[in-house]
Amino acid sequence: MNHVFSIYQTNKIDQSFHYQAKIDMYHSVFKGHFPDQPVVPGVCTMNMLKLCFADALGYAVRYDYIKECKFLSVIVPQEHQVLDVKFDFKTVEDKLNVIAEVSYNGNKAIKLKATLV
């Protein structure tokens, strides 16, 4: 499968993870979202986060409950080709919770609080 992002783990301390995601700015999704002014679709970013979580855990996950998801700035593939992804896992009452943030050049793009299964 041809993903919009390539992900790479760069650091791990306890249950805190740092990844980088490189955007394939030539991916076909940008032809339709939006022609002549491409931006990364939110659903693609949410999937990229899920892939990072699965890589860190060593197994596939899905979102069970999204408590908070804030899209704070637009990700333009030609301008923001490398994203920083930071997240922490915490288990509460047998539920795996994650708090994540995606940024580029020090600008926060997304903040997420969710439960995974």
Image (tube, grey):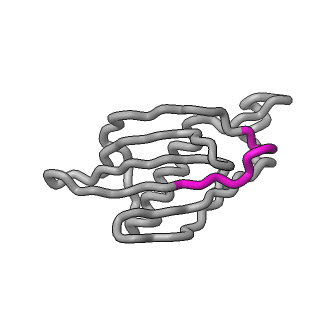
Residue 13 in the image: above or below residue 101: below
Task: Tell me which secondary structure the magenta stretch mostly adopts.
Answer: loop
Count of labels in the image: 0
Apparent side of residue 14 relative to residue 23 in the rendered image (left or right): left
Residue in front for this viewpoint, 15 or 106: 106
Q: Residue 16 at x, y = what percent?
A: 40, 63
Q: Residue 74 at x, y = what percent?
A: 66, 33
Q: Is residue 84 magenta?
A: yes
Find residue 33 and report its image quarter. top right
Q: Split into 4 quadrants, where in the image is the N terminus?
A: bottom right
User: Going 76% across and 29% down the picture, which residue do you hit?
Assistant: 34
Residue 88 in the image: above or below residue 107: below
Q: Residue 8 at x, y = what percent?
A: 59, 66
Which segment did they paint magenta? Answer: 76-85
Residue in front for this viewpoint, 94 or 89: 89
Q: Residue 113 at x, y = what percent?
A: 37, 42
Apparent side of residue 73 relative to residue 57 in the rendered image (left or right): right
Q: Is residue 34 magenta?
A: no
Residue 81 in the image: above or below residue 72: below
Q: Residue furthest right?
A: 36
Residue in front for this viewpoint, 89 or 56: 89
User: Going 68% across and 49% down the picture, which residue do you hit?
Assistant: 105
User: Going 14% across and 51% down the picture, which residue do you hit?
Assistant: 93
Find residue 65 and report its image quarter. top left
